[in-house]
Amino acid sequence: MFEKLLEDIKKYDRIVIHRHKNPDGDALGSQIGLKNLIIDNFPGKDVRTVGDEAGRYAFMEQSVMDTVPDEFYAGALAIVLDTSGAELISDDRYRIAEKSFRVDHHIFLEKICDDEVQDTSFESCCGMIAYFAREAGLKLSELSATSLYTGMVTDSGRFRYDSTTAKTFELASFLMSAGIDTNRLFSNLYAEDFEAVKRRALFVMKIRFTEHNCAYIYNTAEEVKELGMSTFAVSRGMVGVMGDIKGVDIWVNFTEAEEGIFCEIRSSKYNINPIAVKYGGGGHEKASGATVKDKETAMMMLKDLDAMLA
């Protein structure tokens, strides 16, 4: 599956690794993990990462991106990770590289790169990179393993989502053999101070329900500003507060931003991806997102989600 990627990595001495904007643990984990995997196994190669700031994942080692001038792309390989659509890529200079290659686990939306490996059977892009490392017989450092494991944990919902398979645990075991400090990792991922707990409680109190029990939260720009939280932390970070409500099979978090209204859609039972695609987004069957232009459009999306439950 990864024969062409391995060939390209061996061929090119300059490699730039891209991922999607507003990175989550999987985007950063696959990016940092692959970078060090290449450096550790192919000495002499200049491998760099690019993209916007890491946000809440700034605790990850090497989460600060590299400086890459335009001329570095001449004769270089660009690898795009964990991204379903071209407009989602953080730093579009992958287009000016001599060769581009995408590795992704989302539902296919469009061809982005010269060569691509896309497989929705993986719970995470990090899982795909771990599989690549194992099948290619590459040596795995603790840094690479920890980065990849972080993405597997976060994108699988701590191995709770039904995207988790026997293959997930096989690859997690492979990564664990490199000596991951899970205590340190999980304390960074999930430990909260009391103020954060109180903020989460505020979002719980904002939960509303449609006629057919689709749960939703609507966050105005003013509310986000008053909380002092980033838009991403509110949008992606708080959608999970609705995930364990008995009788709720679809939930969505709407957050006003300069770009429009971020819509994070989740389900424990239904394929909500077509709804996200209808509104210009995408993702997975049970975890997708989109950005719409105004509240009226967001409420149209909510109506469509409610209709799925009728």
Image (cartoon, grey):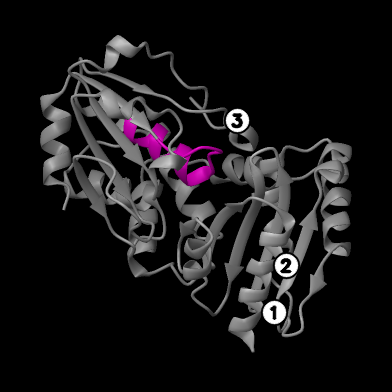
236 or 212: nearer the eye? Answer: 212
On screen, residue 220 versus residue 2, left or right, reads right
Residue 87: give x, y in percent of width and height: 44, 41
The structure residue drawn at horizontal position 65% and vertical position 37%, both measured from the top left corner, is 56
CB within 8 Å, label 2 to label 3: no
Q: Which residue is mark 1?
A: 248
289 or 244: nearer the eye? Answer: 289
Q: Residue 9 sits in which quadrant?
A: top left
Q: Residue furthest bottom?
A: 310
Amino acid type of the residue that numbered disc 3 sits on in the rendered structure: Ala
Residue 254: give x, y in percent of width and height: 71, 56
Secondary structure that dominates the magenta span = helix
CB within 8 Å, label 2 to label 1: yes
Amino acid type of the residue that numbered disc 2 sits on in the rendered structure: Met
Q: Which callout, 2 or 3, points at the residue further toward the start of the chain?
A: 3
Q: Secondary structure at mark 3?
A: loop
Q: Which residue is mark 3?
A: 58
Q: Which callout, 2 or 1, points at the residue further toward the start of the chain?
A: 2
The structure residue drawn at horizontal position 72% and vertical position 61%, both measured from the top left corner, is 296
Q: Which residue is mark 2?
A: 242
Q: CA distance from mark 2 to mark 3?
A: 25 Å
Q: CA distance from mark 2 to mark 1?
A: 8 Å
The region drawn magenta spans 19-35
Give the foreground label among 2 and 3: 2
